[in-house]
Image: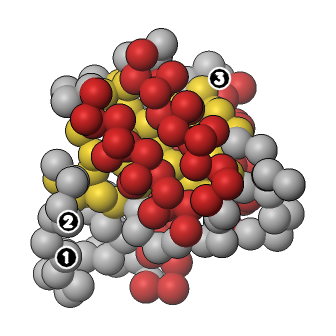
């Protein structure tokens, strides 16, 4: 099953939503993506969740998975409305909390087929993850869609 992950800045304007939704739909229709994985720590993640939930109305076979960077026993999170499942990457139990989000994101980038990114701040974790993802893109094992900053 083809999968797609989202990475972007905490501060993301709703102005990008039309482009984000169009990218989600393109990934479903043209690329055959059936699973979207998203975190829940910022504005871009919230917009991505909204876009996938909207797309699920038209494409009910699509699955939405919530990425958990912290162990579910340590920080229990019930599966939120509209999500099909949660995912805690294997081997994360010994990762220090302060780098758990970065490490979980990197794990998912290493295991998905597609990445939809909104990362334009030069010195940010989102931008660093996109740069890391580009090494997989060079090997043709990952396709990255970059959303442009509006305005």
- The front one of 94 and 73 is 73
Residue located 19% across and 27% down the image: 61
Q: CA distance from mark 1 to mark 3?
A: 35 Å
Q: Nearer the viewer, mark 2 or mark 1?
A: 2
SS at badge 2:
loop
Residue 94 lies, in percent from the top left, at 34, 77
Residue located 27% across and 36% down the image: 56
Give whichever of discs 2 and 3 has the lower sequence position.
2
Q: Are marks 2 and 1 in contact (CB under 8 Å)?
A: yes
Residue 150 lies, in percent from the top left, at 79, 51
Left or right position of 114 against 59: right
Residue located 13% across and 72% down the image: 78
Residue holding disc 1: 77
Q: Which mark is residue 80?
A: 2
- The front one of 112 and 80 is 80
Q: CA distance from mark 2 to mark 1?
A: 8 Å
Seen as rendered, the residue at the extreme top is 30
Q: CA distance from mark 2 to mark 3?
A: 35 Å
Q: Is residue 141 above or below residue 53?
A: above
Using a 10 Å C-alpha cutoff, classify the residue at mark 3 as few (fewer than 14 neighbours), some (14 to 19) or many (20 or more).
few
Residue 90 lies, in percent from the top left, at 27, 58
Residue holding disc 3: 139
Location of the C terminus by quadrant is bottom right
Number of marks present in the image shown: 3
Q: Are marks 2 and 3 in contact (CB under 8 Å)?
A: no
Left or right position of 55 against 26: left
Using a 10 Å C-alpha cutoff, classify the residue at mark 1 as few (fewer than 14 neighbours), some (14 to 19) or many (20 or more).
few
Residue located 79% across and 52% down the image: 149
Residue 89 lies, in percent from the top left, at 31, 58
Location of the N terminus by quadrant is top left
Q: Is residue 104 visible?
A: no
Residue 91 figure quarter: bottom left
């Amino acid at each position: 099953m083809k999968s797609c992950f989202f990475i972007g800045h905490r501060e993301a304007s709703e102005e990008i939503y039309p482009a984000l939704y169009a990218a989600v739909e393109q990934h479903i229709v043209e690329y055959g993506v059936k699973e979207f994985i998203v975190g829940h720590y910022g504005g871009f993640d919230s917009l991505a969740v909204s876009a996938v939930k909207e797309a699920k109305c038209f494409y009910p076979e699509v699955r939405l998975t919530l990425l958990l960077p912290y162990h579910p026993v340590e920080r229990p999170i019930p599966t939120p409305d509209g999500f099909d499942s949660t995912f805690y990457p294997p081997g994360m139990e010994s990762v220090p909390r302060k780098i758990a989000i970065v490490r979980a994101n990197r794990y998912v980038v290493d295991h998905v087929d597609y990445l939809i990114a909104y990362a334009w701040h030069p010195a940010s974790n989102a931008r660093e993850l996109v740069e890391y993802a580009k090494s997989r893109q060079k090997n043709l094992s990952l396709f990255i869609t970059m959303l442009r900053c509006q305005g």
